[in-house]
Image (cartoon, grey):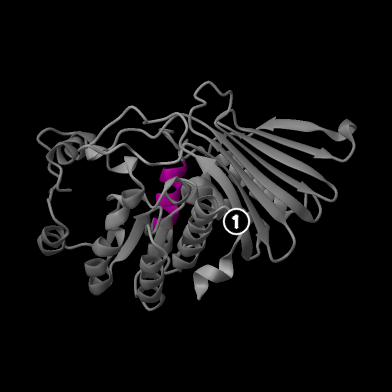
Amino acid sequence: DPHPPSLEAGQIACGLQPSPVNTFSTVDALLEGCELDAVVIATPNWTHAEVLDPIFERGLHVLVEKPMCTTLADCHAVSRRAENHPGVFWVGLEYRYLSPVAALLQALNQRAVGDLKMFSIREHRFPFLPKVDNWNRFNRNTGGTLVEKCCHFFDLMNLAIGSEAIRVMASGGQDVNHLDEQYHGETPDILDNAFVIVEYANGVRASLDLCMFAEGSRDEQEIVAVGDRGKLECTIPTGELIHATRSRADLSIETVPLDPRIAHTGLHHGASYLEHLDFLSCIQERRPARVGAREGLRSVEIGVAAHRSIEEGRVVDISELRD
């Protein structure tokens, strides 16, 4: 990490001061200074493609935080390199590992709602947190809000629906957050609210309702799946799984327990830890990543299409992004 306070925080997190953990301020110094098996990349979004280059050259196992890259050009370049990479290549889309979400996905696989027809995600939450030099306040650094953070949700849509997204339409804006902030004479330009509708090749429709000035919400996220036989909902952080057939008499509500391996929940309720355990197991058992370059690309693709839809005021066909 080139930021000294971040290096110091990492040492403190390891439990000893002075810490026995080696620290490096550049990727090259890290690669030259250690014998490594795996690397986790948690650098700012726009640096991912550059940081991945020497990792690919060394053939190391790698987990790169979401979004895989901020542009589709970089995503495609990384995907091509990942195809023949000898190590495990993993993209950090950890919302799959949230206990309530995992329970909902399992129930869907067991056809709890019959044939899935609609899938929706509502996230009403707090604004973007401060980052080093506030890099996350500008679209050029993040890829835009619908890429930077919502790739998590688009990945969930893709996973639950099991089909290819074909059309995206969106409406959004920056209406409340960061408008009174200035960095080097610039006002932040990141969206703080949006509606996104995604149509899939198998006829299923999905939607995202995002608001980042709704700190007072009971639940930060609500995920809803509706099929021809019933409805499933999960709530985060309250952790409820709600199942109903088309008769209200069959409504059931259960609280999904946290995975017992989670000792500290953090902002993602332990999902990041479970994801890292799975990454490790794939390395040890010589299995391909559960969440690879294809998933990383497809999640960014929908975010890019949604931003284009907002900017140009039209429906965007995913095929436009693949020419």
Q: Percent from the top left, x then y, of residue 195?
A: 59, 43
Of the pair 112 and 36, the residue shown nearer to us: 112
Could you tell whether 72 is left or right of 59 in the image? right
Q: Who's the residue at 26% across and 32% down the image?
A: 182
Can you see residue 107? no
Name the amino acid, label 1. Answer: Arg
Q: Residue at x 45, y 46 (%)?
A: 274
Q: Is residue 76 above or below residue 227?
A: below
Q: Which residue is mark 1?
A: 314
Q: Dot 1: what SS?
A: loop
The answer to if 275 sits in the magenta stretch is yes
In the displayed structure image, the side of residue 37 where residue 112 appears, left or right:
right
Q: Which residues are magenta?
A: 271-279
Identity of the residue drawn at 39% across and 35% down: 128
Residue 294 image position (x, y, % from top left): 49, 67
173, 13: nearer the viewer: 173
Magenta residues, dominant SS class: helix
- Seen from the viewer's position, the closer of residues 291 and 143 is 143
Foreground pick, 123 / 40: 123
The picture quadrant where one finds residue 109 is bottom right
Q: On screen, 194 above or below 298?
A: above
Tell me if residue 54 comes above or below residue 183 in the rendering.
below
In this rendering, position of residue 186 left or right of residue 99: left
Q: Is residue 68 above or below residue 243?
A: below
